[in-house]
Image (tube, helix red, strand yellow):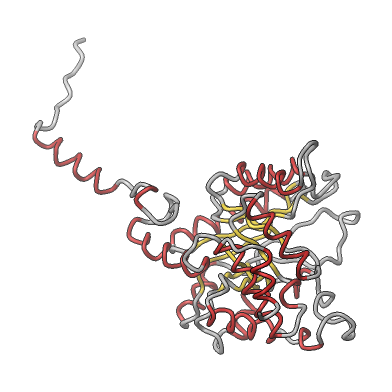
């Protein structure tokens, strides 16, 4: 039986088809201010860039103010009787006052907190850029009792309800515990939220922490690098990681650079960790940026465990190092008000 002939469209139609395909192709990365993932709709690229500008003070590097610890660490980070933590830190309003003053000064990227916390204060501070944290858990249940799991308490519709009320939400955040027996559930949820955020022109940040009974060392540099790579594979714009220990023959900042490379176009932002003396903290931050090739930092306790005035100056000092490439000496001068 002879092979039937397939009717071909007129040759002149191919030119028009190619024009249509060319119009649908995403803009090349080199033509844009930032890397814009291909799951951001073409007609929302400008919105995505606006949100990235807001989150990074127009630099692509993020000075994130981490305000999600009211659940993560309960009240341990906010009240100690006034011995080291100022009594004003016990009031959540302290976080938003710091955030607004820093936003007015142009020294903050985003304030990251749970949707409920943000909704309680955001009508007073609607222009402050917010990163809505969708999941959280406390530190009460230890790994010896159960592997960590933290699933979403809100959906993207809840996030959009804030934006419809005039609140400046620029992105979402989600924590994943790599190595937990529940990692698949968290990765799946996070991947779906990242996709939905991008479809709305928002950015997405993941907190990537190796943790669980299968994890011998939560700061193993190989595991931190692996977590960074997972963040890239699920499409996150930034990944917050703990400061890793050192590979053999490397320093900690050099080992962090391995994680930054493993993350590809996902920017690594390093956890601020526990409170340190100002100079020690700023030196570590400088090393993370200049040697570790980070794209920012997520700082909580080293900002909010201070008086409002000190916290505002510390945020400005962090901004100078992260976004302007300032030296430690220059950043210290900012912190000291010189």
Q: Nearer the viewer, residue 240 or 302?
A: 302
Residue 325 place in picture, x, y as percent: 58, 61
Left or right side of 266 for 178? right
- Residue at the (54%, 80%) spot, across then down: 105
Query: How many badges with numbers are in the image?
Result: 0
Q: Quadrant of the N terminus?
A: top left
Residue 283 place in picture, x, y as percent: 73, 61
Q: Residue furthest top?
A: 1
Give the vertical position of 113 relative to 31 (above or below).
below
Residue 88 place in picture, x, y as percent: 77, 88
Q: Which of 46 and 156 is in front in this view?
A: 46
Quadrant hosting residue 289: bottom right
Left or right side of 326 for 86? right
Q: Nearer the viewer, residue 240 or 138?
A: 240
Q: In which quarter of the image is the C terminus?
A: bottom right
Q: Nearer the viewer, residue 8 or 117?
A: 117
- Residue at the (68%, 66%) spot, across then down: 329
Residue 111 place in picture, x, y as percent: 61, 73
Give the vertical position of 214 relative to 334 (above or below).
above
Left or right side of 38 for 306? right
- Residue at the (39%, 66%) spot, across then down: 47
Left or right side of 19 for 303? right
- Residue at the (66%, 45%) spot, across then down: 257
């Amino acid at each position: 039986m002879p092979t039937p002939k397939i009717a071909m469209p007129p040759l002149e139609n191919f030119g028009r088809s190619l024009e249509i395909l060319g119009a649908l192709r995403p803009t090349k990365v080199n033509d844009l201010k930032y890397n814009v993932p291909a799951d951001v709709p073409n007609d929302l690229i400008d919105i995505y860039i606006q949100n990235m500008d807001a989150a990074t003070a127009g630099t692509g590097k993020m000075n994130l103010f981490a305000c999600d610890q009211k659940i993560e660490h309960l009240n341990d980070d906010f009240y100690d009787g006034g011995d080291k933590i100022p009594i004003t830190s016990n009031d959540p309003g302290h976080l938003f006052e710091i955030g607004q003053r820093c936003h007015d000064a142009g020294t903050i990227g985003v304030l990251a907190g749970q949707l409920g916390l943000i909704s309680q204060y955001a009508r007073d501070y609607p222009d402050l850029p917010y990163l809505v944290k969708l999941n959280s858990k406390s530190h009460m249940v230890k790994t010896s009792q159960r592997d960590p799991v933290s699933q979403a308490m809100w959906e993207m519709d809840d996030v959009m309800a804030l934006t419809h009320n005039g609140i400046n939400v620029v992105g979402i955040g989600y924590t994943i515990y790599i190595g937990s027996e529940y990692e698949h559930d968290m990765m799946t949820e996070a991947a779906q939220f990242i996709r939905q955020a991008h479809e709305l022109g928002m950015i997405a940040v993941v907190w990537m922490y190796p943790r669980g009974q299968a994890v011998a060392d939560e700061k193993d540099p190989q595991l931190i690098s692996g977590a960074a790579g997972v963040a890239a594979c699920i499409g996150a714009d930034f990944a917050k990681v703990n400061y890793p220990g050192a590979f053999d023959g490397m320093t900690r900042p050099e080992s962090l650079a391995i994680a930054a490379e493993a993350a590809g176009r996902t920017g690594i932002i390093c956890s601020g960790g526990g409170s340190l003396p100002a100079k020690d903290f700023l030196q570590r931050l400088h090393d993370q940026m200049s040697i570790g090739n980070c794209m920012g930092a997520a700082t909580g306790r080293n900002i909010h465990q201070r008086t409002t005035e000190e916290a505002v100056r510390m945020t400005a000092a962090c901004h100078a190092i992260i976004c302007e490439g300032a030296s430690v000496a220059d950043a210290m001068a900012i912190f000291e008000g010189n």
